[in-house]
Image: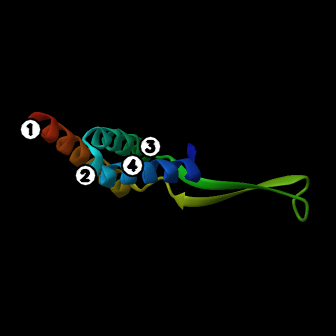
Amino acid sequence: MPQAEAGMFLIMLGIALVTLLMSFKLGTMLKAVSAILFFVLSIMMFANYDIVYTNVVTGGACSPTCTETKYLINENQSWLAWVFVILGIFSALMFALELMSG
């Protein structure tokens, strides 16, 4: 199963949401950034990536090391991918409409 690091995923999600919210005050280009990030997140989810935290433990019962994997999002979460697609389309349409209006 392909895995993506949860920290990177959450940072991208945070940047996408912040740029979408800031675009209402600061300008239209942030809507394009937000749309691109939402589409990237949806592609990751449609590609059945597991979003995980990994932790390497040394000592104790682990000889010499053990890797612990904690799942934030399992692979079969296509509803979440569709939410990201809808947010990306929403951001892209708002960007295009603001460009057309002047």
- Mark 2 surroundings within 10 Å by alpha-carbon count, few (fewer than 14), some (14 through 19), many (20 or more): few
Q: Which residue is mark 1?
A: 101
- Mark 3 surroundings within 10 Å by alpha-carbon count, few (fewer than 14), some (14 through 19), many (20 or more): some
Q: Amino acid at mark 3?
A: Met
> What is the CA distance from the residue labelled 4 to the residue labelled 2?
13 Å
Q: For residue 44, which numbered disc appears in the image? A: 3
Q: Amino acid at mark 2?
A: Phe
Residue 1 in the image, given as x and y percentages of width and height? 57, 45
Is residue 48 visible to the viewer in this orientation of the structure?
A: yes
Secondary structure beneath dot 2 equals: helix
Mark 4 vs 2, N-terminal side: 4
Q: Which residue is mark 4?
A: 16
Residue 69 in the image, given as x and y percentages of width and height? 67, 57
Tell me what residue is drawn at x 44 percent, y 52 percent.
13
Tell me what residue is drawn at x 39 percent, y 45 percent.
46
Relative to 44, residue 100 above or below: above
Secondary structure beneath dot 4 equals: helix
